[in-house]
Image (tube, coloured by chain):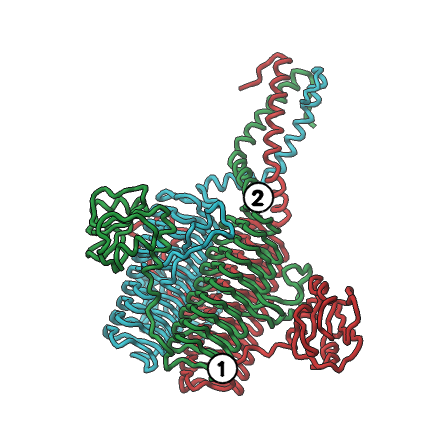
Chain colours: A green, B red, C cyan
Amino acid sequence: MLVRDIAEALGAKLDGDGEIAIDRLVHPARAERPSDLAVAISPQAAAALAQTKAQAVLVAAAAPPPRSFSAVIAITEPRMALARLTALFDPGPPHERGIHPTAVIAPDVKLGADVSIGAYTTIGPRSRIGAGTTIMPQVTIGADVTVGAQGLFHSGVRIGHDCRIGDRVIVHSNAVIGADGFSFAPDLMSASAFTAAVAVQRVHSLGNVEIGDDVEIGACSTIDRATLESTRIGRGSKIDDHVHIGHNVSIGESCILCGMVGISGSVVMGDRVRLGGGVGVGDHIRIGDQAVVAAGSGVGSDVAPGAFVSGYPAQPHARSVEQHLYLGRQKRLHDKVAAMASRLDELERIVGRTGKK
Amino acid sequence: MLVRDIAEALGAKLDGDGEIAIDRLVHPARAERPSDLAVAISPQAAAALAQTKAQAVLVAAAAPPPRSFSAVIAITEPRMALARLTALFDPGPPHERGIHPTAVIAPDVKLGADVSIGAYTTIGPRSRIGAGTTIMPQVTIGADVTVGAQGLFHSGVRIGHDCRIGDRVIVHSNAVIGADGFSFAPDLMSASAFTAAVAVQRVHSLGNVEIGDDVEIGACSTIDRATLESTRIGRGSKIDDHVHIGHNVSIGESCILCGMVGISGSVVMGDRVRLGGGVGVGDHIRIGDQAVVAAGSGVGSDVAPGAFVSGYPAQPHARSVEQHLYLGRQKRLHDKVAAMASRLDELERIVGRTGKK
Amino acid sequence: MLVRDIAEALGAKLDGDGEIAIDRLVHPARAERPSDLAVAISPQAAAALAQTKAQAVLVAAAAPPPRSFSAVIAITEPRMALARLTALFDPGPPHERGIHPTAVIAPDVKLGADVSIGAYTTIGPRSRIGAGTTIMPQVTIGADVTVGAQGLFHSGVRIGHDCRIGDRVIVHSNAVIGADGFSFAPDLMSASAFTAAVAVQRVHSLGNVEIGDDVEIGACSTIDRATLESTRIGRGSKIDDHVHIGHNVSIGESCILCGMVGISGSVVMGDRVRLGGGVGVGDHIRIGDQAVVAAGSGVGSDVAPGAFVSGYPAQPHARSVEQHLYLGRQKRLHDKVAAMASRLDELERIVGRTGKK
């Protein structure tokens, strides 16, 4: 790819020789050949420009390079540029094209054009895989599953029977879609009397999981199937590693769930909800559109649209900050109250009463 | 299955035509054919009854349907009814019967009657699988493992050597039973002086994991093997997704561990203990029978039988609630103390002393 | 192994017959044959010595056995002794030697001497596996991966393309090394205006993961690849189950990360850092050498070398303890302030002013 083409794809300003061919993006300190583009968007990387062996560099327009280079691409929105740039240079994980002879695919599975299926992957009866989708080795896809087009399913992904996955969905290794929900009768967590005489019965999961287009699901994440209906992940939502989504949950579009988020059963979330790392959400809770929950919070009650909450239990963030501030002043307050008590004693002595009750 | 048979299995009252054949349970809004049974136990689902195309409906006796249907099953204990109803209609995950030709099973493995083993599953020497157990594709079972009867092991489950699993155990995808414990010498977390000169040594895990009958283990959960003895999960205990159980832990019978619970090494739990989602328990802690720990709590000391604790560190729930209440009143208290200080100043001025020390 | 050899390997004192051959380490209560060595280091196990059938016992020198045995090994540092003892008796997981015929190994993969590769494992083009390394069944290793010598990779481990793993590395089942980082543009968690008009773009992960010698990684843990560079785990670091390490993170040498720790992107940790179970660390945070973070803490700002922090957000542990102490005295303080207010009222009445403003 030519420097000129990269600058154009990024909508960036180019100074110098646009004809240099680039085959690798590197930190300035690691550049070693003419075809390396040194990416110096962060201040740390920019500091390494003085010593780089690179001939072509990419910098933030606000931080011009400390010396001249054969080619300088200057971008204005660093993170957006990084997204476009890395997309340009990502060939995806190397894999063999086509259907590996060891894949065990039920005879009635429908495969779209240009589907790749890796070694030892198994696909159950009546399932369909959309055009251009890549399934890496050792994936298991159950019966009656529908997978859309242009998806990427990494090794060890498990998709249970009846689940439906949209187009351009990426699922990382060892994620599990469609395990049974964790549901018993009686409702054990709230049961006031759980004695040895109580026979615990399983509520079976007869529903499925439905995942919209452009969803990404992280490694070792789990999305449980619904009891009768569907557990739903809306279009464009992004889910990090180790995230758990319980049965009957409905997540809206373009939500962001950071690592180790846990969503209990029957939670309903709107669109563009953002949950920081390690957030837990109790069952049946509703979280409105564009709400934000700070990392590490535990959500025990509904969250209004647009709200920013934090803490355990989660409350409006401003209140958490205020409480935290006063928490740090407890000793001072105790000392102040003790001093005032002494002054009261003295006043009462002078005025002629003991005052102590 | 006939409506009459369903009503009988649920011990429920039936009005109307008991001869209707049912092959599917659906939300009232999704009913489309005569063989659909519309399940309207929740208020939301009941509200959809007015418009349903279903002919047969199942309702809570306390909430009779808004219009007449061909058949009405009325139940009194909704959650128990849901458990029995879903059990009636759960055929389990579709799978091929018998032993798949690609399964790699050591010659001396003993398989009970009617065992199913999926594609690419491997089973090590001297292991035994009980009658009627189903092992889905791509499971690995090590050497000298004993698995009971009527179990269900989903794809990607890993069972390490020497582990013992009871009857009717369900393990969901990508759960790991029998990985090594996380144990080093010196005891690094409590070591006061951990310098570069300290050589970290591994305490090897020579023990195993023993799991009782009727246990269920969620997707991506891990149960580590013991150092010398057994990590134990008692009969009937239910473990959700992403739960970690450390080495040497002993968990009693009929315990409930919700998603993302983490149990450190050598914890001992009694029977019917319930841990909410995300609870962490420190090592060597003892939790008594029927104790309950609220979601998100961190347990740093022993919990008495029957106690209900919450918070970080966990304490009796009533105390957590009280502390939380006062936390919300900190600003008011500071303001009140400041006003009282002014009044003290004024009194001291009047009485003729400064009082300020 | 003879009792004499064991005592010598532990540097321990031996009383009695050193010629007894030992083939198993057991709890005193489970000893049943002459070749059992009853390990009674813990007080609980020592209490069982009175009734044991063992002839050879291992005890803490500080707690001599209650009666005579054929052989008594007395150790002084219990945990170190346990490490050495379990290492002596650990044959590792049973597995077939050599390359299983079903393994799918690209023709140009370079395998060192004495490598074992289990059934259905796949290894991509140009990868290298060092001498003496054991790869259990159903592992996937991508293209261009380098794995060092004497390693042990359990079933279900996924290693993505381009990753580099040192010598003597142990990775437990279903751990994922080299999944893509969770990174989008704009920076969604901090974006103040995330409306439907914002097009979310993926920042692709073109970097890799590099893992030093003697690292251990627990079951179901995930280490994401870097955007352009490497996510790094330093030599000798030990990582428990369900740990998540985000993209671009750098972890020093001999760090200890307990179960369910979550490290956000671009965190930099020094050497010998210890993180208790369930700790979360926010992105771009720096944690200095030998710092300790208590279990369950949420780290929201940099941690100085050698610091001991706890709480949410994490702060110096002494301050957390102080705050917690005062938290428990809130009611008493409120009551005291209320009583003082009454005394003020009374004083003001006597002095002749109302004082209430």
Instruction: Give the x, y percent position of residue C187.
Output: 43, 49
Residue carrying label 2 = A316
Looking at the picture, how far across and down is residue C78, in whole percent? 38, 59
- Which labelled disc corresponds to residue A218? none
The N terminus of chain B sits in image quarter? bottom right
Query: Disc 2 sits on a residue from what chain?
Result: A
Can you see residue C1? Answer: no
SS assignment at label 1: strand
Horizontal side of A239 relative to A184 (left or right) equals: left
Name the residue nearer the viewer: C349 or C227.
C227
Name the residue that disc number 1 marks.
B129
Identify the element where label 2 is drawn: strand
- Given residues A335 and C195, the one toward you in this image is C195
In percent of width and height, residue B17 lies at 78, 79
Q: Nearer the viewer, residue B39 or C177?
A: B39
Residues under labels 2 and 1: Cα distance? 53 Å
Q: Amino acid at mark 1?
A: Ile
Q: Quadrant of residue C40?
A: bottom left
Image depth: mark 2 or mark 1 in front: 2
Q: 10 Å neighbourhood of mark 2: few (<14), some, or many (≥20)? A: some
The quarter holding residue B307 reads: bottom right
Taking the image as shown, residue A193 lies to the left or right of residue B276, namely right
Classed neighbour count for the residue bearing mark 1: other residues with Cα under 10 Å, few (<14), some (14–19), many (≥20): many
* On screen, residue C331 above or below C72: above
Task: Please name the residue shown 38% across and 75% down the image.
Answer: A118
**Amino acid, disc 2:** Pro
Question: The residue marked by circle 1 belongs to what chain?
Answer: B
Name above or below for residue A317 compared with residue A177. above
Q: Between residues C15 and A6, which one lies in front from this camera angle?
A: A6
Image location of residue A302, percent across then percent down: 61, 51
